[in-house]
Image: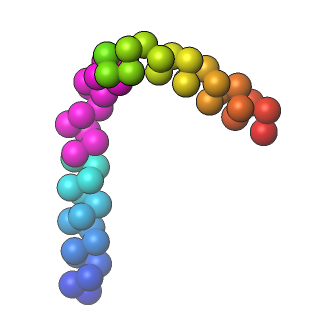
Amino acid sequence: MENQIDKKEKQDKIVGMFDDIASTYDLANRVLSMGIDKQWRRKGCDKAYEI
């Protein structure tokens, strides 16, 4: 039972961390990649569409 609680607490912390950064992630990615992320996304979508 204790392992399930620990696992749930870890999951909650991870979800919280991603919730905290989600609002600024795209902007940070755009700046840090100097705009290349648009090309990565396009290529990723094209590859996914092929599958």
Queried whether the magenta region covers residue 49, the answer comes back as: no
The residue furthest right is 50
Residue in view at x 29 percent, y 31 percent: 22
**Looking at the image, what colour scheme do you see?**
rainbow
Q: Quadrant of the N terminus?
A: bottom left
Q: Residue at x 56, y 18 (%)?
A: 39
Residue 36 coordinates in the image, percent (x, y): 47, 17
Q: Tell me residue 15's x, y (percent).
A: 28, 49
Nearer to us in this view, 40 or 23: 40
In the displayed structure, would residue 18 be above or below residue 14? above
Residues shaded magenta = 17-30
Q: Residue furthest top?
A: 35
Is residue 44 shown above or below 38?
below
> Residue visible at 29% across and 60% down?
11
User: Would you say 6 lies left or right of 40 here?
Assistant: left
Residue 7 visible in the shown view: yes
- Residue 50 position, x and y percent, is 79, 32
